[in-house]
Every structure is written in C-alpha cells, then in structure tokens.
Image (spheres, rainbow, N blue to C red):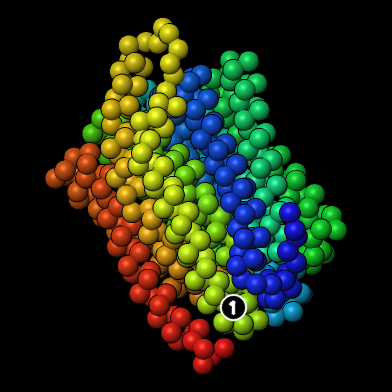
Amino acid sequence: MAKVSAEQLGSEPIGQLLVKQAVPASIGILVMSLNILVDSIFVGNWIGSVAIAAINVVLPVSFFIGALGMAIGIGGSSIISRALGADNHAKAVKTFGNQITLTLLLTISMVALGLYFVDSLIPAFGGKGAIFGPAKIYYVIVLYGIPFLALCMMGNTVIRAEGKPKFAMIAMIIPSVGNLLMDYIFIYLFDWGMHGAAWATTIGYILCFSYILYFFRSKNSELKLTPRCFVLDFPIIKEIGSLGFVTLSRQATTSVVYLLMNNILFGLGGEAMVAVYAIIGRMLMFALFPVFGVTQGFLPIAGYNYGAQKYQRVRESINKAILYASVLATAVFIGLFLFPSEIASLFLSSKEGLPESELAINAFVLEHTPTAMRWVFAATPIIALQLIGAAYFQAIGKAVPALLLTLTRQGFFFIPLILILPNFLGELGVWISFAIADVLATVVTGFYLRREIRTTLSPATS
C-alpha cells in the first residue's frame, strides 16, 4: 500500500488521496470493530449473555477516560495538519509533545477517580442485579490499561495527521488480534471467565502502545521530540482543548446515553433488555466502519488543504467524502435490514445444559433484537452528511460549530427523545428515537455545511 507524505495531501487528486487515506483507516476500524464484535461473541458463548450486558455497562466509563486521549489527539492533530500545510514544523512538534503530557496527566487522574468510585459508578450505568458482579471484575482490570488506550488513541490520530495511514491501520490491528488471541487462551483454554476477558482487553491496549512508541522512535515519523516539547505551552493547550473538547463532548454524551439507555431498558425488561442493547451497541461500532473510515481519511486532507488555503480542494474533499460514505452506509443498511435475526443469534450460546434463566434471556434477545436493529439503523443511508459535516469544522479548527454539530444528534435530539417517547411507546419509543435523531441532525448539519461552503469555501475566496 502506497505511503502518503504530508506534502501529498496538498497535491494528489482528491479521489485518489481519499481512497489512500480512507482504506487503511477503514481496515483499521474494521479490525478494531471485529475485535469488539468477536470478543462479544466469545463472551456470550463462553461466559453467558449476562456477561455481554456487564461489558456494555463498563464500556462508557472506560471509553470516556480513553477518549481523553482521542480528544487530545484529534484536537492536536488538527493543529499538526494545518501547521504542516503552512510549513510550520516547529509548531507541529511542540503540539505533539504537549499532547503526550496532557494525555498522561488527565488519564492517570481519571483512572484514580474511577477506581475510587467503582461501587457507585457501576450501578449508575446500569450494572444492577446479576450484572454487578461480572461488571466490577471487568471494570477494575480494564481500567489499569486505560492510560495505554488513551495514548494509543492520541498517537493514532497524530500518525494519520502526518499522512501515514498505513501505520495508523497497523496500530489498530495489533490490539485487536492480540485481544482475540488472549480471549481464546484466557477464556476458552484457562476458563478465567470475566477475569480472562478483562486481561485480554488490557494486554491488547499494551501491545498497541508498544507499536505506536516504536513508530515515533523510528525514522518513519517526521515528528522528532526533544525534552522541551513536553513542557506545556498555554496557547497550544488552549487550541488543543478547544478542538479536543468537541471529541470529548461527543464521548461524554455517548457515556450519558449508555447510562440512560441501560437504566431505561433495565426498567423495561431487566438484564435481557440490556443484553439486546449490548448487541445493538456492538453493531453500531462494527457495521459503520467504512463510513467512519472515510471520515477519518477526510480529516487530514481537509485540514492540510485548508491550512494551505487550497479551498477548491477542500470543497472537492467534502463532496467526495460524502458521496463515498453515503454509498457505503446504504450497503450497510441493506445488510442489517435483511439479516437481523441471524446477527443476533451469533452472540448467544447454543451449548446444551444452559440454566433456565439463561435460556429465557436468549429467547427474549432473539425475539426483540431484529425489530430494534431495523429501527436503530433505519436512517443509516443519510448519516454520511452528518458525520462529514461535523468532521469538516473540526478539521479546519472551528471549534464552536464543530462542537454544536457533534452534540446535535445525541445531545440535542436523542437524549430528549429517549426520555420522552418510552413513556408513551414503551420499548418501541427507545428504538425509533435513533432514526428520528439521525434525520433531524442530518438536516441541521446540511444547513450549516452548505452555508459554510457558500461563504468561506466559495470560488471567490479560493
């Protein structure tokens, strides 16, 4: 696979460049998503459906802390892409050093708090009844590996900002393969149960961190750090924070959604209903990998060319990214609409001798998941506009519109909907909230993106 240098981001044809950036990103996201998917299948078949629900309870807490690294990474990478486009290498290197310092300070502090409040956080996120015990086991072990995850998320976005998507792809593949291998050893062979699932995940994070450290210490990276780069610089920190806050807000909102969904669904159907949402959540992470890949590939292209004031190329990258992502999203929609029952059955144990309670949960999940999945993904064909539009404002350093558009779907529409509709429609009200929020958020994003193109990116300003 051909390498892409930072300079090529401003010179190669956009379509060709987008494919070079998006394909490795998509493959990396695919493998990472497959890891989450297969990990859930292993856990469901080898431990039980309650274990899947337990992991679903832990994810929003661990991912929020890990997302601090992603937020710092995306915020800083926007600066790095524009600095490289403007031929300001010193600022790019200084930004990277500050990203590392910030990530370590914030994530270690958050892990300490997360461990201290463990018995309060797990029930708050829906870890009640039979779910609490396995959720606590998984949570405590995985939290020790979260600083490594945060550094991986941060480093991966910087690698992509340098125009090295192949290495970013490998960094995403390594922990996934490592986790699945450890799953087989720890859960299936050693029969460690939730302990095994947690240690497999944590070891995967450490393997990823080791590879990213190798990349930045090798000749493949253009960002060579000196000790002075790690000293926090307030203007850079402020810019990283304003842009990274967009990503962090999105993840914080996602964590709030998990909290509300797990509690609302537990009230509607107990552990079994939470297990349905756990399967839906895995498919939300997995099925949209090509769309997320195009979005990730689009970010450095838009940021670099905006920094170089090549606005015609920015416009072209927006149009082609939306087109490519829309085609892929439609293909995903068709597959999920046609085969929801088959997908749900993959997560459930079919071995003989299951307890009656487990058999009852499996039957409930198989009955309720297909309808839920179809409603959740009903608006998938149009979400490309929403994702690319929000990503554009983040790529060019416009933090306020990026933040507002990022929060539009879940914060402004989805959360109010799931608080209101289930009171009138029950379970159905939960699932149709996904589609309604997607449609409304896409309309709002399309309006603001069109206005931005007509003003900042019009031919007259190119």
List x then y, in percent, for residue 124. 36, 39
| Residue 432 seen in the figure | yes
Judge from the rendering whether residue 295 lies leftward or rightward of residue 420; answer left or right. right
Q: Quadrant of residue 39?
A: top right
User: Which quadrant of the figure contains the N terminus?
Assistant: bottom right
**Residue that protrudes farthest toward the right in the picture:** 219
What is the residue that sits farthest to the bottom in this orientation?
460
Q: Residues within 10 Å of mark 1 (few under 14, many from 20)?
A: many
Identify the residue at image location x=44%, y=80%.
452
Q: Residue at x 46, y 24 (%)?
A: 44
What residue is shown with label 1? 313
What residue is rendered at 52% in x and 54% in y? 292
- For the question of whether residue 105 can be seen, the reply is no
Q: Is label 1 in a helix, a strand or a loop?
A: helix
Report x, y in % for residue 394.
Answer: 52, 69
Q: Is residue 450 above or below residue 192?
A: below
